[in-house]
């Protein structure tokens, strides 16, 4: 039987993304000139680069979302696009949320698949000739 160190739990990649979405919800109530948006965007981009690499489409999608131009890249539904909205900063916040939730959904699916593969049965053949 394999012993597990129950004291150590590796942080999941999706946990960091979930924390960023929670932060975004808090920032949505602040004014747009609040400098924490720049810090938030930098943190989020760094997190995405750490998970996927600098040239991944998710990093690009997030950059477009920060300026409210991500609709075409991530196929946001019409309700998320709000075509009548002229408030670009509000649109940017909404698109950040949509992009991050979309990335989170994909990441959780991948993590579930990884966990499935990694929790497979570990067996070694006994020593000796086979």
Image: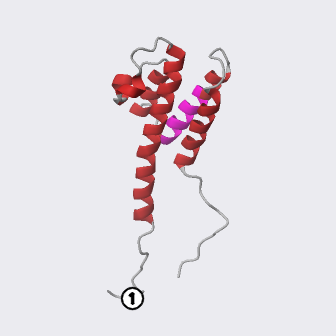
Kindly identify which residue carries mark 1.
Answer: 128
Percent x, y for residue 86? 47, 11
Q: Residue at x 53, y 19 (%)?
A: 90
The residue carrying pointer 1 sits among few (fewer than 14), some (14 to 19) or many (20 or more) residues within 10 Å by Cα, namely few
Residue 99 belongs to the span the image colors magenta: no
Quadrant in which the C terminus is drawn: bottom left
Location of residue 47 in the rendering, given as x and y in whole percent from the top left corner:
55, 37
Q: Is residue 129 visible?
A: yes
Q: Position of residue 24 (x, y in %)?
A: 59, 31
Residue range in magenta is 41-51
User: Is residue 31 left or right of 129 when viewed as pictured?
Assistant: right
User: Which residue is drawn at the image coordinates 47% and 42% (left, top)?
Assistant: 104
Q: Check disc 1 and report its element: helix, strand or loop.
A: loop
Q: Where is residue 73 drawn, in percent x and y?
A: 35, 26
Residue farthest to the left, as pictured: 130
In the picture, measured across the screen, residue 101 lies left or right of residue 28, that is left
Residue found 65% across the figure and 14% down from its top? 33
């Amino acid at each position: 039987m394999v012993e597990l160190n129950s004291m150590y739990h590796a942080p999941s990649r999706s946990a960091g993304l979930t924390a960023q979405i929670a932060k975004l919800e808090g920032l949505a109530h602040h004014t747009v000139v609040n400098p924490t948006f720049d810090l938030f965007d930098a943190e989020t981009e760094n997190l995405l680069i750490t998970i996927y690499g600098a040239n991944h489409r998710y990093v690009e999608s997030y950059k477009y979302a920060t300026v409210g131009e991500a609709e075409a890249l991530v196929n946001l539904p019409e309700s998320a696009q709000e075509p009548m909205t002229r408030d670009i900063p509000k649109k940017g916040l909404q698109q950040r949320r949509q992009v991050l939730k979309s990335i989170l959904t994909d990441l959780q699916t991948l993590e579930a698949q990884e966990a499935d593969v990694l929790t497979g049965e570990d067996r070694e053949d006994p020593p000796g000739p086979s």
